Amino acid sequence: MLLHKIDYSYTHQKVSCYFDADFSVIETLVPKTNTIIITDSNVYTFHQAKFNGWDVIVIEPGEENMQQTTIDFIIAELIKKGLIKKHILSVLGEALLQILPHMLQVFICVGYPLV
């Protein structure tokens, strides 16, 4: 298992990013019971069995979905799922790679603790 971890420090917290890790590593980092995974339908369809037992938000992939309405949808779903008590984990597809930094900035601005 190849695992590359990069930590980013902000004023009030640290965010850790993991690259090239096997999917099974996720469960050693965060518990299924209080984690929400955000991914796109391409990644979800290809790896559907790996998402069993996880709370997942699936968005549509592609350039046309890299917009504020997708961010609004993700934030609304996170609120419905009780994001305050959850870890947020993204298994990136192209659309998420583009919009996730903006979405995370919204959470930082309102004081949500990122883990």
Image (cartoon, helix red, strand yellow):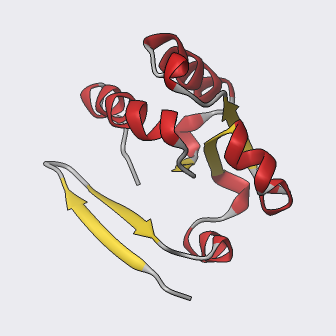
Q: Quadrant of residue 4?
A: bottom left
Q: Quarter holding the C terminus?
A: bottom left
Q: Quadrant of residue 59?
A: top right
Q: Residue at x 53, y 37 (%)?
A: 84
- Placement of 29 over or under 88, stated as above or below: below
- Image location of residue 74, percent across then percent down: 57, 25
On screen, residue 109 versus residue 70, left or right, reads: left
- Image location of residue 21, percent across then percent down: 53, 75
Residue that extends furthest to the bottom in the rendered view of this protein: 1
Q: Nearer the viewer, residue 10 or 72?
A: 72
Residue that extends furthest to the left in the rendered view of this protein: 11
Q: Residue at x 64, y 25 (%)?
A: 77
- Image location of residue 30, percent across then percent down: 59, 65
On screen, residue 65 versus residue 82, left or right, reads: left
Q: How many marks?
A: 0
- Placement of 36 over or under 15, stated as above or below: above
Q: Residue at x 70, y 42 (%)?
A: 42
Residue that extends furthest to the front in the rendered view of this protein: 63
Q: Residue at x 56, y 88 (%)?
A: 1
- Placement of 86 over or under 110, stated as above or below: below
- Placement of 76 over or under 61, stated as above or below: above
Q: Nearer the viewer, residue 82 or 66?
A: 66
- Image location of residue 38, percent across then percent down: 60, 42
Q: Nearer the viewer, residue 103 or 19?
A: 19
